[in-house]
Image (cartoon, rainbow, N blue to C red):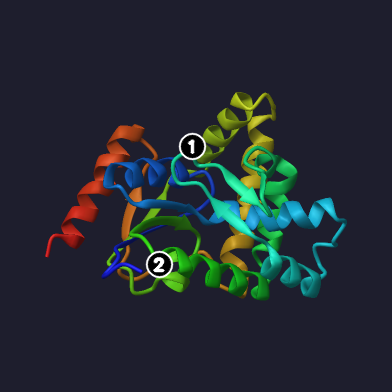
């Protein structure tokens, strides 16, 4: 337990660059980086592996509660029940399943409870869809990171290429728009900008520029 931990909450749609920036900012600040999207992906991966139907909300809740999820700060590796699943959770199949799993209210409650534990032992940079609105509404630093849908699709397509996979841009953009709709229209913790969050459009910015912009916001909101 630490005294007065700082929470930097970064929300925004898929492909906006949250993970990359949150990881870099956490390293600069010496904070723990928490990728909440990876947490939902682990539950989705577990469900797919054991044949759980994605509309079986009761079973998905059981998996979410039972999942032993560990995030390794230094390497960014993700572990599920002791297994390194860092690569396994990044497939398109798991991405789509995670978006559906994340819409289950009981799963979100289970993940939020796990996410809150991280801030009990360290100052953190946490990114996701509902960090500033649901997980840490009291966070001193809230940022809503956005980017043009086409720019986000291009970034996602590049990630696929780097991981040895390929997909047409229009297919990637179409899937991203469907995910955006699911995230914004779900009943439990929809993707929203918190009223007191700083809006940051990263469409035409280099990674270094976005990183500095976020650090500037952190300094402004924690300097007092």
> Which of the 4 image quarters holds residue 193?
bottom left
Q: Are there few (<14), some (14-19), or many (20+) residues within 10 Å of tag 2? A: many
Q: Is residue 87 above or below residue 45?
A: above
- Residue at position x 81%, y 53% from top? 48
In front of the other: 90 or 179: 90
Q: Are marks 2 and 1 in contact (CB under 8 Å)?
A: no
Q: Which quadrant holds the C terminus?
A: bottom left
Q: Give residue 89's mark.
A: none
- Residue at position x 81%, y 67% from top? 55
Instruction: Tell me where residue 31 appears, x and y as whole percent.
Output: 33, 51
- Residue at position x 77%, y 72% from top? 57
Q: Which residue is mark 2?
A: 132
> Which of the 4 image quarters holds residue 166?
top right
Q: Which residue is mark 1?
A: 151
Label 1 SS: helix
Instruction: Tell me where residue 54 appears, x and y as whole percent.
Output: 80, 62
Instruction: Tell me where residue 145 appears, x and y as whole percent.
Output: 39, 51
> Which of the 4 image quarters holds residue 118?
bottom left
Pick out the residue farthest to the right.
51
Mark found first going from the N terminus, 2 or 1: 2
Label 2 SS: helix
Front position among marks 2 and 1? 2
In front of the other: 171 or 11: 11
- Residue at position x 34%, y 71% from top? 195
């Amino acid at each position: 337990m630490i005294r007065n931990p700082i929470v930097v909450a970064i929300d925004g749609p898929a492909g906006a660059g949250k993970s990359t920036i949150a990881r870099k900012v956490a390293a600069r600040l010496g904070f723990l980086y928490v990728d909440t999207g990876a947490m939902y992906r682990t539950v989705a991966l577990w469900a797919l592996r054991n044949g759980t139907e994605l509309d079986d909300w009761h079973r998905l809740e059981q998996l979410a509660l039972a999942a032993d999820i560990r995030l390794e700060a230094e390497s960014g590796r993700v572990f599920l029940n002791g297994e390194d699943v860092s690569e396994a959770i990044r497939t398109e199949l798991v991405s789509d399943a995670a978006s559906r799993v994340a819409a289950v209210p009981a799963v979100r409650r289970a993940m939020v409870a796990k996410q809150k534990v991280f801030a009990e032992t360290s100052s953190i940079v946490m990114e996701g869809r509902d960090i500033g609105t649901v997980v840490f509404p009291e966070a001193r630093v809230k940022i809503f990171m956005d980017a043009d849908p086409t720019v986000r699709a291009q970034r996602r397509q590049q990630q696929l290429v780097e991981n040895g996979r390929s997909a047409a841009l229009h297919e990637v953009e179409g899937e991203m728009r469907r995910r955006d709709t699911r995230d914004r229209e779900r009943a439990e913790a929809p993707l929203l900008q918190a009223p007191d969050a700083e809006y940051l459009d990263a469409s035409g910015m280099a990674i270094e520029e976005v990183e500095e912009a976020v650090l500037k916001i952190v300094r402004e909101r924690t300097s007092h």
